[in-house]
Image (spheres, rainbow, N blue to C red):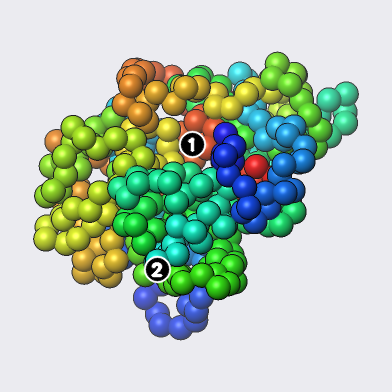
Amino acid sequence: MRYLARPETEPGWAYGLWRSAFADVTDALGARYAVYNHRLVPVTFGDCRFAGYTALRTGAILMDASGERALEVKGPDAGLYMDRIMCRRMSVMKPGRASYGLMCFEDGCLVSDGVVMRMAEDRYYYVHASAEVFSWMRAHVGDLEVTITDPDISVFQLQGPKSLQVAHAMCDGFDLETFRYFDVVEATVDGLPVILSRTGWTGEIGLEVYTAGRQEEGTRLWRAAQKAGEAFGIMAVGLDVLDMRRIEAGIMNYSSDFDQTMTP
Amino acid sequence: MFVGKDHDGYVGAEALAVADRTPLVRGLFCADGECVQGADLLVENRAVGVVTASTWSPTLQGGTALVRLSQALEPGTIVQVATRGKVTCSAEIRALPMFDAEGLIPRGKAEIPFEGADLRPPATA
């Protein structure tokens, strides 16, 4: 037995749950949600998960992955700061690149995992899994000139062998030929600014699309991805589908497969 | 590989320098069914780990799972585990990842065709 949440039109208690910029769309598609990182994330739209898996392996899938929370690290000491808290040296990473990033407690056990994206010499994003990271990061600023903020970013995943073609059809300012694994670029979709990272949670070729917009912008982005993906058999899926592929790929989930009792 | 060899001075670095490196998260493959998430892994009726994530893999044609071990177990070790339908089956500890070990697919360096046949697990799973 498992318990999933569904939309409810009657107003009332809903404190502490964050809806992504794509929630109007995923609600309309009939999503059932899990709570991950204090956020509602679509788990299923009621479709057969094997159909979603086939789309992921042969075409493209679209999934609201806003359980990933992106925190911004900005300031002249941003590189020094990231080196202080990350198990890899992030100050040597060039702007426009990303890296897998682990943070540990003093005893070596894991605080969190996630992806570090360097946007500029003095600005990073840390996109992390379900863990109490914000307070931990702020507590380690110390004497460094850096600020840690939550820019309220939503993200969807475009994954599958046709995903880059979908992105190419969807985006302005996107060069398919030069977009390498773990590259990060800024582009526009339907006039809306987005960040693209060539990362994902499936072991397939793919990318993630980040927006600071809210419902209106999120709906436009989702519709643009669906339209661009029509020719490639794109399918909206939930975590149930990604779970199948990430297990094959050995991609671990913080808080269930590993946690704060374990070292890297 | 997730910790920079040329990096020190970060929070936790001193502890990690002397930490036990025994892998405690492994893969599990069960040809006969989909393992139950939360099920114990048994060797001679003794629990040696637990299933933390589980699915049926249409690509590998078997139950695939991530498991957290309470002791070191090498790939190839056979354990007993509950599968959906309450059937206990033999399953094999595997190294991660269980598919596309070199990560060629996400890098765009290989296409491994998926035929889409026999998607579903056997009736007992």
Residue at 69% across, 19% down: B75
Q: What is the x, y in percent for residue A156? A: 33, 52
Residue at 20% across, 49% down: A225
Q: Secondary structure at mark 2?
A: loop
Q: Nearer the viewer, residue A252 or A185?
A: A185
Q: How many marks?
A: 2
From the viewer's perspective, is A167 left or right of A212?
Answer: left
The image quarter containing residue B109 is top left
Residue at 70% across, 16% down: B76
Q: Which residue is mark 1?
A: A246
A51 lies above or below A171: above
Q: What is the x, y in percent for residue B5? A: 59, 37
Q: Residues within 10 Å of mark 2 (few under 14, many from 20)?
A: some
Q: Nearer the viewer, residue A52 or B74?
A: B74
From the viewer's perspective, is A178 left or right of B39?
Answer: left
- What numbered label is drawn on residue A75? 2
Q: Quadrant of the C terminus of chain A?
A: top right
Chain under disc 1: A
Residue B34 seen in render: no
Name the amino acid type tagged 1: Arg
- Is there a contact, CB below 8 Å, between mark 2 and mark 1? no
